[in-house]
Amino acid sequence: MKIYVGFDDTDNAKADRGTGKLARWFEDVLPEGCTLWGVVRQQLLVDPRIPYTSHNSSACAVVDCDDPSLIEVLIGRAVSHIERHSLPGSDPGLCVAAESDRCLADLARFGLECATKVLTQGDALKAVDGAHLSGHGGTNDGIIGAAAGVGLTAHGWSGRFIEYGGLRRFPDVVSVGELEDAGIGVVSLDRDAHVAPRGNLVETGGWLRPRLLGGKAVLPVMAKGEGLWESPGKKRSKGHKEG
């Protein structure tokens, strides 16, 4: 069973880390019987009416757990994790939902709306309908992004992984086979959608970030040469706090 743990607005403008890093650190406090499947960054609407720290993104840690009774333990540890690592001036929010929760469809719709509209805490509370949603400081506005992050990640068709299968340990050039063995699919974006053979190489530029597509980790690539591909995107400037 997958448990979605959404975090938002845990940092401030002067911080050297973002909510993404806090979400990745959550792996360190998971209870026995739970493992981290991945952490997904979700991009929400950037609009002057919305207060945000840098790029208005939230992060969702996806946890594999076979024991439903551990959900309450996960919530308690997530709350403590936020209290320990959130920074002054932030407005932290937490959302926790299981893949069996009936509210996931509503949360998915809410998340999709958050990508294009300005929504409120009331909208988030209505969408969550029984799952866990809580604020932990400041205005508590982080509950909006936390709920949206859970909804979009459960929807499975947006966001990029900031942790998955030890992606940060891969070298700058990695074979297609190594990526596939780690559970990361490789998909060509060229006109004819060629197959990328397992023996081909992929240049990541030191920034391997698969996308969440169809509920799976997928790395889009473009042909660069014979037997060589490159992944799109690159790390933002040093001041950017993805985590």
Image: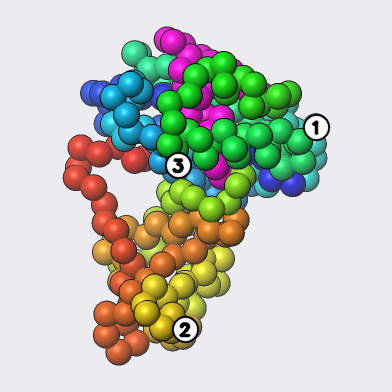
Counting residues from the start of the chain, the first of labels 2 and 3 encountered is: 3
- Residue 135 in view (yes/no): yes
* Residue, disc 3: 42
Residue found at x 80% / y 32%: 69
Going by the numbered disc 3, the residue's amino acid type is Gln
Q: Is residue 81 left or right of residue 238?
A: right
Going by the numbered disc 2, the residue's amino acid type is Val
Residue 67 versus residue 92 in the image, above or below: below
Q: Is disc 1 surrounded by few (<14), some (14 to 19) or many (20+) residues within 10 Å?
A: few
Q: Secondary structure at mark 3?
A: strand
* Residue, disc 2: 195
CA distance for labels 2 and 1: 43 Å
The spot of residue 90 in percent (x, y) is 38, 17
**Residue 6, quarter of the rendered image:** top right
Which mark is nearer the camera, 1 or 3?
Answer: 3
Whether residue 164 is in magenta: the answer is no
> What's the magenta region?
132-153
* Residue, disc 1: 69
Instruction: Please state, as top left, top right, bottom left or bottom right, where the C terminus lies in the image.
Output: top left
